[in-house]
Amino acid sequence: MSLKPMEEKNEEEYTITEEREELMIPPSSDTKPTLRKSHFLKPLINPINQSLPKISHLSLSSPNNINKLLKIVNFKGRPKPLKAWETWVKDLQQTHEIIWKKVGIFHAIKASIYKIKRDNELIMCLAEKWCPETNTFVFPWGESTISLEDVMVLGGYSVLGNSVVNTFNNSKSAKIKEKLVKSCYVIKKKNRSKQLSHCGWMYYHKGRGGEMEHVALLVLWLTRYVLSTNLYITPNVFDIAISLVLGTKIALAPAVLAPIYRDLTLLKEYITSYNEKDGYAYGDDGSYLVLCAPFQLLQLWAWERFPASSPKPATLMCGEPRAARWHNVMKLKSASLRLDIESAADSFLWRPYTLCLKNWEFPKFYCDDERWVLMNSEVGDDLLSFVRCLRVSELVGLDCVMQYLPHRVGMQFGMDQDIPDFVARSNSNVELAWSSYAKPLEGMKLYLPPRLFEGDVTVQYSTWWRSPMLALENDTLITYKRRKRSSRKVRTLSRIIKGPFGLSFEGMASPNPLNIVNDMDSDAGLNPLNEQEDGRMYASIASEEVEGKKVMIIDGGSKHSEATHIGQETERLCSVLAEDNHVSEDEIEVVMKHECNAPVDVEDENDVNGHDRITDGGNKRFEATHVGRGTKKLCSLEAEDNHLGEDAMEAVMKHEYTAPIDVEDEKDDLKQLEARGLVLESRISKLERLVARYKVAKLKSKV
């Protein structure tokens, strides 16, 4: 049914987003503020009549303490898949896939068959940044957290349904539970054990068929892969498994996220105490900190958002959950993992799931254009799920209740960020906590940002956040360093590109590459660079002064766009060519940018993937990719002027463009190049967001 328009006086009660014009600035940037219409998650603080909240200080351990802590912290959550688990899942999928999809656990069960190799050092470095008061990570460049959206996308868990502590019971469920209890007694007697091991449970029930085998599979799945309650089968998940088998949807996402928050808080307190006592009195008496939360989800969260610190993911196959990208992937070795995280201001991906990925199907709540939605009975479960991710609430787990504060990390959902307000707890009892989470959504007004939009922060938020951080920058424990940003505010979305060393990066494929600037008011005249270009010819070219240099701005009019960055090696090449050809470096740079942006012909794809070896005296060897079409044209000009063959000139240019690689260190250098490539991909991923914002503004201006 459709609801009547809400009265203005009651609008605050029916919306979790706030719209107003504000001076906005990108996070970790020194560019000039822009006045625009912005959208924020509530509640927000009013600096006029409220005092500003304090920011949690960063507390870091010495590298030696981190290594010692890794020896006395036991991460028991989410063990690796059992050998016969995958075959059992596939066998039962044939007959129970429909019910799995109905109750929202299909992708979660599929994700449990993949092995995620642990990176405990990464978890420890993230725990250092954890703030127990806000349940967020406090980085020098901003605030972030693992949210319900991450648990829903990466884990496949539902945010809708009944609570895990208040499952539905009837006479049929009581009979099934009675049979489960009897099977426990039989297995213990058969194995002569007081405990029910996971393997013993699986091999007893596997292949028996019927409803009991289905329930037994879900019991093992919940115990071992979801809630990680124990290394043995325990009856506290029986009611949940029976409810799922009978078709009752259970909200597993908050039950999974709550223990992650809880164990991060325990780990942060443990690290703080360890630092204060210089590592003494912990571990020396044989005591260990045992953590049972499914930290593999936190690890995937970090790998998705910190590309520079992440290994190269596998190709996602059709129908696979997103977690399959990281199956059996080796962690990336880094000598300065903490530094990589602290200096990730420009490469951190606020919305990694909105980027195009081969065989990745976007959730339906990611829309190409912004819109306001009124929640009513016609709204589907996908949109209802996204609303749950945006609203402040309490997360109810099996044995804990934790506070969920998404309004502190609005940029993770495509919103802008202002100073968040304090939220009182609603956890005096489980029923009250669950009521805060399951509050009715009927009549709520919701703003949905464009999929490619990346939010900014208000000027007052930037001042509030940076003040204590600047005071800490000179601290010996703080190794955070700022990266220089362009004077232009550029937002891009990554695409499949070929780097200078032939590396492939998955992302958005743009049919017509183009460069675009923030200032769209200047008139751009038509000036084709090459009228012999193929059918995908650029529509227009404009020029702009950027940091004292005149560059070309190419507008192809396509929906998706990206910027080509001229690196140091290319700048050096431009300088050499400009001197030899008696032209300015700016003109050479424009040609290089145009040719790098030119669409790759099918005939040239094999050339792009090829490699040449150039030997220097037998001691060093240089690895270079085939030069682009623009460089080939320059090679031809150089060859004529210097009376050399084009092949010889091309070899010289390859030598200029590439850096030497030692034979012994080639593997390590390749890993560094892959990491640099991932950083490049994330930086490229920011221009298209500006394009989306510009098009929305342009449409509004026309209206």
Image (spheres, rainbow, N blue to C red):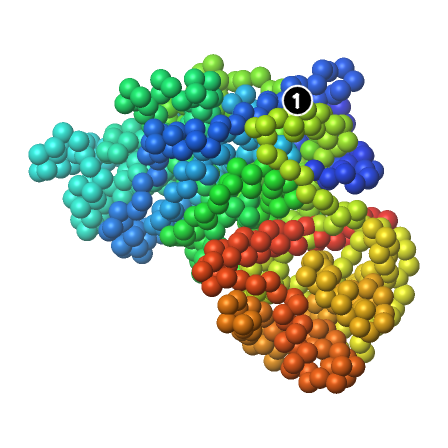
Above or below for 645 versus 345: below
Q: Position of residue 85 (x, y in %)?
A: 27, 49
* Residue 435 position within the rendered picture, expressed as x and y whole percent measured from the top left: 50, 23
Q: Which residue is mark 1?
A: 421
One can see residue 540 in this view: no
- The residue shown at (80%, 33%) is 22
Rendered position, 570 above or below 292: below
Q: Nearer the viewer, residue 618 or 522?
A: 618
Q: Is residue 88 above or below residue 190?
A: below
Q: Quadrant of residue 392?
A: top right
- Left or right: where 236 falls relative to 645: left
Q: Position of residue 415 (x, y in %)?
A: 67, 38
Which residue does the image show at 64% across and 19% down from the upper left?
A: 54
Q: Secondary structure at mark 1?
A: loop
567, above or below 580, in the image: above
Asked where in the image residue 350 lies, by quadrant, the reply is: top right
Q: Is residue 280 left or right of residue 694?
A: left
Is residue 112 at least partly visible in the picture? yes
Q: To which quarter of the image does residue 470 belong?
A: top right
In the picture, the quarter occupied by the N terminus is top right
- How many residues crowd mark 1 within 10 Å: few (<14), some (14–19), many (20+)? some
